[in-house]
Image (tube, rainbow, N blue to C red):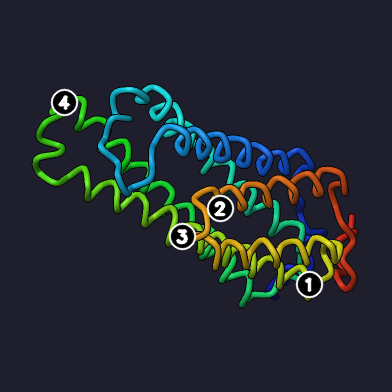
């Protein structure tokens, strides 16, 4: 006789402290982004002087990104755990995929930036003469401010849709999610600081999860409170 998943008892939930991962992600990626924005000038008119004057701050900002990525993976797990059995498979797939794409693009952009800094340290003149500097700058800009920020917006839109359909969070949070997601998708050209919208949203969501408790009761989730 085959044992069904229902025979295994209640659904396991993550500890309440796991929501702190979102706070850590917001703090780390927000700090890293702010440091990079203040240390590295826009692509247009960039002469590369920051490689000498702000190299320490840039290295520190890039060093924070892998730890922010680890925290973001935990945050995705917390979001999915809060949904329980009411998770919509279609939108959950979009949410999970866009989250991983955002993280992958962030890592690739950081790796290119690290490679640029290290190459400059080894052979400063060759970096500019070969055209590698311009290529790396344009690639990092495109990954972070064109593609990555929009994947973050898709992550927010899909998450907000799941929340709206399941009733897992208050309506004000769903509305806030949609507004900020639209800013992420259509607003990157307005300001380079638009990349800070996503960590701000993650911070708000994580604080709400921390204050709401460990095991939300979602209407229709019959096993949410099963011992």
Question: How would you rate the neighbour count of disc 1 (Cα within 10 Å): few for under 14, some for 14-19, many for 20 or more?
Answer: some
Query: Which residue, given by chain and number where applicable, does mark 4 sit on?
Result: 122
- How far is disc 3 from disc 2 in space, using C-alphas? 18 Å
Among the 4 quarters of the image, the one containing residue 42: top left
Query: Which residue, given by chain and number where applicable, does mark 2 sit on?
Result: 194
Q: Is residue 5 shown above or below 68?
A: below
- SS class, disc 1: helix
* Residue in the foreground of this view, choosing between 107 and 217: 107
Q: Residue at x 19, y 32 (%)?
A: 119
Q: Is residue 140 left or right of residue 156?
A: left
Q: Earlier in the sequence, mark 1 or mark 4?
A: 4
- How far is disc 2 from disc 4 in space, using C-alphas? 33 Å
**Residue 28 screen position, x and y as percent:** 57, 35
Query: Which residue, given by chain and number where applicable, does mark 3 sit on?
Result: 101
- SS class, disc 4: helix
Q: Quadrant of the N terminus?
A: bottom right
> Are discs 4 and 3 less than 8 Å apart at CB?
no
């Amino acid at each position: 006789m085959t044992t069904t998943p229902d025979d295994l008892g209640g659904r396991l939930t993550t500890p309440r402290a796991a929501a702190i991962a979102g706070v850590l992600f917001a703090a780390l990626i927000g700090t890293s982004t702010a440091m990079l924005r203040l240390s590295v000038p826009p692509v247009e008119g960039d002469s590369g002087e920051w490689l000498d004057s702000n190299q320490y701050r840039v290295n520190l900002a890039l060093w924070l990104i892998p730890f922010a990525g680890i925290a973001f993976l935990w945050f995705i797990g917390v979001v999915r755990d809060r949904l329980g059995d009411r998770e919509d498979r279609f939108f959950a797939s979009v949410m999970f995929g866009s989250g991983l794409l955002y993280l992958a693009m962030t890592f690739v952009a950081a790796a290119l930036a690290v490679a640029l800094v290290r190459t400059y340290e080894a052979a400063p003149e060759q970096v500019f003469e070969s055209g590698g500097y311009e290529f790396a700058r344009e690639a990092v800009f495109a990954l972070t401010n064109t593609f990555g920020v929009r994947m973050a917006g898709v992550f927010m839109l899909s998450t907000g849709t799941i929340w709206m359909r399941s009733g897992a969070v208050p309506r004000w949070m769903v509305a806030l999610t949609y507004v900020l997601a639209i800013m992420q998708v259509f607003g990157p050209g307005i300001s380079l600081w638009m990349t800070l919208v996503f960590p701000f949203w993650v911070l708000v969501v994580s604080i709400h999860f921390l204050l709401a408790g460990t095991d939300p009761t979602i209407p229709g989730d019959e096993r949410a409170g099963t011992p």
